[in-house]
Amino acid sequence: MVRDTIRFWRQGRAVEVSGFRPRTTLLDYLRLQERRVGTKEGCAEGDCGACTVALGRVRDGRVHYEPFNACILLLGQIDGAELVTVEDLAAHGDLHPVQSAMVESHGSQCGFCTPGIVMSLFTLYHGGEQVLSRESVNDALAGNLCRCTGYRPIADAALQACGRRPDDTFTQSMEQTVQGLARLADGQDVFIGDETRFFAAPSSEASLAALYAQHPDATLVAGCTDVGLWITKGMAEIEKIIWLGRVAGLDLIEDGAEALGIGATVTHAEVYPSLARIDPDLGELMRRFGSAQVRASGTVGGNIANGSPIGDLAPALIALGAELELRQGENTRTIPLDNFFIAYRRQDRLPGEFLRRVTVPKLKVGEVFRAYKISKRFDEDISAAMGAFKFTLDGRRIAEARVAFGGMAATPKRAKETEQALVGLSLDEPASWGEAMAAIARDYQPLDDHRASASYRSTVARNLVFKALSETASGETHATRIVGQRDALQAAE
């Protein structure tokens, strides 16, 4: 069965849309078709948050709301979800609790970015977190810029309205919404267009494999956090789009005793707890991965298959020894993640072949992991350099090492010269670490760009080798981490 429309829940009823161009964004649909202009266009690249909307999907019997950047989300990606915009919040002449809190806290001046901020607070309001901190509020608002008001009154509004049991029209109509979304979940393939131009959303791996084999020139879209920029900034006329968000099975997480299995369409928000349990550094890396909007949309598979040289997740998973499972038609194969990247934006992927699963080994006894993201801003910034290290220890000596960096080459890449120099080093003899630090210069010849100079990147990478060894030797991270110092300062206040 194939459906030629997308269907979503909107203001208590099902909406069907057909005949749209594959590259149509949700923001354009809202502003140009619905004429709902409360959702603003600011940066058009998913950074400022002025276009934030909420999508609701059923999890554990209730509707779970997450924030999304409508400017880089395709219209077709809201199939099967509830769409909520800023115009939907007030009811019966009364403002929503987060809107009232923004008014009472004087959290808005020019008002342009306020709708997006309000929508982020709406998702925080429904997030179920009973005890909010200033830090968790900052995390929720990291993807929303405000250049007028300043964040103190906005954070005050969040602390005032959120962190309690939600009670609004959305909770009151929750049962009706759950039932409506269940009726939309028909398990059908979606195909809108013709053989030359289409938006497709297969519902099974078999359908995906067949369609991609027939159209290997189609663009695969998972979260659209990068492809969206091809459209809004590159003005790319993408004629064939296959969205993976409805493919059953690609969204599964299998948390085993020795390894973590991550389906290609698992989002960064969904995988965060599982990765954080492998190591706290992975958790901190994912907390700083884009914004709440990006983490709700972006996927593990998309981040890897995109092949960006500055993708933060790939170096960490390379250091851990992750493997990829790829599928082409009825055939599957498994390769090490570090062999997947061939050159800038080129991967070991055959025509019609897609990434279906990532397997991440968990740390064993005697293994130590460290990961560091270096960027100009702490929140929502692309790395100048990102380093990941896994040491296998034999007492106080390094028996084996895996080191990978992002931002240092045209692809995420292992530092094999550095790895060899690390083997055999004593954690109790810092004077012997110099050769391993110097080996970074043989592994990478980074470029100068607007994020950092080549000399800065080389110096930082060299210093991160020392930092990883120092923290492993002492077992302490608090004194060397900005986040630890920030927490201490906040506690002192």
Image (tube, rainbow, N blue to C red):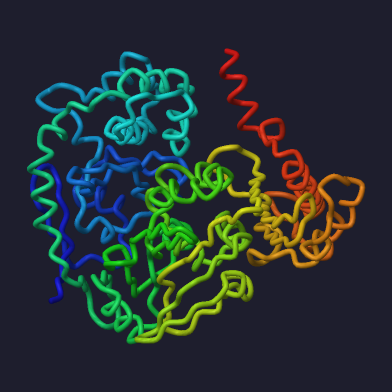
Image position of 213 with respect to 18: above or below: below
Residue 43's x, y, as percent?
46, 45
The quadrant in which the N terminus is found is bottom left
Q: Nearer the viewer, residue 43 or 389?
A: 389
Horizontal side of 32 relative to 489 (left or right) equals left
At a point 27% along the width and 67% down the height, the residue shown is 248
When asked about the image quadrant of residue 194, the answer is bottom left
Q: Nearer the viewer, residue 172 or 154?
A: 172
Judged from this view, the residue extending furthest toward the right is 431
Horizontal side of 151 relative to 203 (left or right) equals right
Residue 384's x, y, as percent?
67, 50
At a point 39% along the width and 54% down the height, the residue shown is 267
Image position of 252 with respect to 153: above or below: below
Image position of 376 with respect to 488: above or below: below
At a point 46% along the width and 59% down the height, the residue shown is 260
Image position of 291 with respect to 324: above or below: above
Horizontal side of 288 relative to 75 (left or right) equals right
Residue 446's x, y, as percent?
75, 60
The quadrant in which the C terminus is found is top right
Q: How many marks?
A: 0
When asked about the image quadrant of residue 428, the answer is top right
Residue 414's x, y, as percent?
69, 65
Judged from this view, the residue extending furthest toward the front is 395
Q: Nearer the viewer, residue 361 or 23?
A: 361
